[in-house]
Amino acid sequence: MESTQSKNSFSPEFNKRLKRRYRAEQRFKIMGIGAIFIALAFLVFLISTVFLNGYSAFKQTYIQLDVTLDQKFFPEEDLAKGDFQGIIKQSLYSMFPEVTSRRDKRTLNNLV
């Protein structure tokens, strides 16, 4: 007696379904590879954006100031309580005497 499975496996409908399944599998592989390439492109874009926006964090800027150590900034009993920021601000203001507005002074103080 002949098996119905072997008879159906060679039928034209079966071959049509098999071809359709292989085409679907091929489309699935292509879409999977495409998705991987798109994900890699976004990853490269993300990493390059982070690098290009953040490279300036690795730069250093130096400001050279002439500092005059006044006795009024240091209490005699405790030098650790000295107004070191005041000394730096005074040096900055003497270096840039044209800065008079409060906003400009704040911007100048942010340099240090």
Image (cartoon, grey):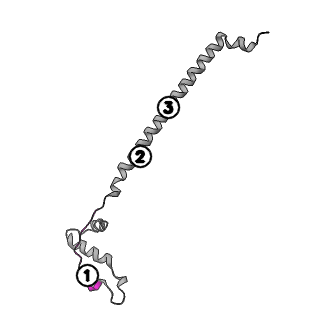
Please give the name of the residue rendered at 38% of the width and 46% of the height, measured from the top-left corner.
49
Specify which label sits upstream in the sequence, 1 or 2: 2
Q: Which mark is residue 47?
A: 2
Which portion, as a residue range, is magenta?
A: 61-72
Q: Is residue 75 above or below residue 26?
A: below
Please give the name of the residue rendered at 67% of the width and 11% of the height, measured from the top-left corner.
10
- Mark 1 or mark 2, whichever is nearer to me: 2
Measuring from the top left, give residue 17's x and y in whole percent: 63, 16
Give the Cα separation between the discs numbered 3 and 1: 68 Å
Task: Tell me: 101 left or right of 49.
Answer: left
> Any magenta on residue 85?
no
Please give the name of the residue rendered at 40% of the width and 49% of the height, measured from the top-left corner.
50
Where is residue 86, by image quadrant? Answer: bottom left
Q: Is residue 64 above or below residue 71?
A: above
Q: Is residue 88 above or below residue 77?
A: above
Give the Cα separation between the discs numbered 1 and 2: 47 Å
For the residue labelled by badge 1, is the local secondary structure a helix, a strand or a loop? loop
Task: Tell me: 95 left or right of 79.
Answer: left
Q: Which one is in front, 49 or 104?
A: 49
Q: Which mark is residue 33?
A: 3
Count all numbered tags in the image, as a single digit: 3
Please give the name of the residue rendered at 32% of the width and 66% of the height, measured from the top-left corner.
110
Q: Are marks 1 and 2 in contact (CB under 8 Å)?
A: no
Measuring from the top left, give residue 52's x and y in whole percent: 35, 49
For the residue labelled by badge 3, is the local secondary structure a helix, a strand or a loop? helix
Q: Is residue 15 above or below residue 69?
A: above
- Mark 3 or mark 1, whichever is nearer to me: 3
Where is residue 105, by image quadrant? Answer: bottom left
Q: Which one is in front, 72 or 99?
A: 72
Where is residue 45, by image quadrant? Answer: top left
The residue identified by callout 1 is: 69
Measuring from the top left, give residue 12's x and y in whole percent: 64, 10
